[in-house]
Image: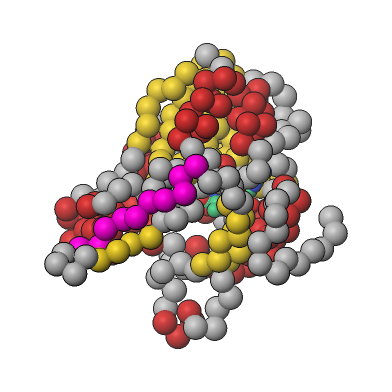
Amino acid sequence: MPKRKFKGNPPTISEGDVALHWDENADLWTEHVRKGWDSYREHLNNPAFLEFIGSIECKKILDAGCGEGYNTRIFAHMGAKMTGIDISHRLIEHARRAEQKEPLGICYEVASFTDLAVFAEGSFDAVVSTMALMDSPDYEKAIREIYRVLRKQGDFFFSISHPCFMTEGFGWVTDRKESKPSLIVSGYFSKKQSIERWQFSEVPEDIRKDAPLFAIPRFPRTLSEYINTLIQAGFTLKKLGEPRPSVSECRKYPYLQRWRDSGAIFLHVHCVKS
Ligand SMILES: C[S@@+](CC[C@H](N)C(=O)[O-])C[C@H]1O[C@@H](n2cnc3c(N)ncnc32)[C@H](O)[C@@H]1O
């Protein structure tokens, strides 16, 4: 794949570009995630998602867009027989190295979830995907492929940034009279692809100032696009989840309070191959 560098945002972002960006993010992402600096994952998203999916013991599961395997290892510890795929070679290298160090029986492959030709139809009891499907330009193709590799009545669970709140014009305002920040949502219907640049909020101050930012391609979609594509592929929708921090979680992690008061940062989806 040719190496390309973008200044600002390219007009359209291909799957090859996504792979390139994630290869460049891979070392930093792996280090910071493993240090526990992805606080939203640790304190809100993962606890809610693990409850959402329930027991997965002994199930043969594909993790689509597994990254360096942080969550894949959690699913393996829960007793599932895991295969992880990711489009980034570098992230899969990190995942394989972790597997060599502490074998959990996880098999990793470099592949796109839009082309799962390496797996036969009906290969898996379930597919999980955490925070990856909104990072791909071709959601529809991904859903068709995921449907194909699932067995009949197989479960598909995924998490994404909540499309209704994490919009192009997302931001916070604090009213003069109110001390609480309020969420602003705009540009919900925008189709503008972009490269988001940020770092985890838990990165310690002394490291933060010199650490490069992740460059993450984003492909906005509406809620109806996400859900209708599942239905058109043949899935039956079972359940949606919108994790809301509890009072005690907010006491422990005060930065979560705004997500208790204002809106949902993540959307969890469960559907079944009918
Ligand atoms: C935000 S990261 C999440 C990684 C992992 N699921 C986790 O929760 O730690 C998004 C991941 O999606 C992967 N990705 C994006 N497009 C993909 C595609 N078409 N096929 C497979 N992986 C893809 C990226 O390489 C990246 O690892």
What residue do we see at 40% from left, 34% from top?
A: 53
Whether the magenta-drawn stretch holds residue 187 is answered as yes
Residue 171 is drawn in which quadrant?
bottom left
Whether the magenta-drawn stretch holds residue 5 is answered as no
Give x and y (percent) for residue 240: 37, 32
Image vertical order of residue 12 relative to residue 181, above or below: above
What residue do we see at 50% from left, 42% from top?
A: 189
Q: Is residue 274 visible?
A: yes
Drawn side of residue 106 relative to residue 5, left or right:
left
Give x and y (percent) for residue 58: 50, 30
Drawn side of residue 77 relative to residue 148, left or right:
left
Residue 124 is drawn in which quadrant?
top right
Residue 183 is drawn in which quadrant?
bottom left
Give x and y (percent) for residue 81: 56, 36
What residue do we see at 49% from left, 53% from top?
A: 168
| Residue extent of the magenta highlight | 180-189
Image vertical order of residue 1 relative to residue 107, above or below: below
Image vertical order of residue 203 relative to residue 271, above or below: below
What residue do we see at 42% from left, 78% from top?
A: 204
In the picture, the quarter occupied by the N terminus is bottom right
Drawn side of residue 12 relative to residue 73, left or right:
right
Give x and y (percent) for residue 111: 72, 43
Magenta stretch mostly in which secondary structure? loop
Q: Is residue 59 visible?
A: no
Name the outermost residue toward the left: 177
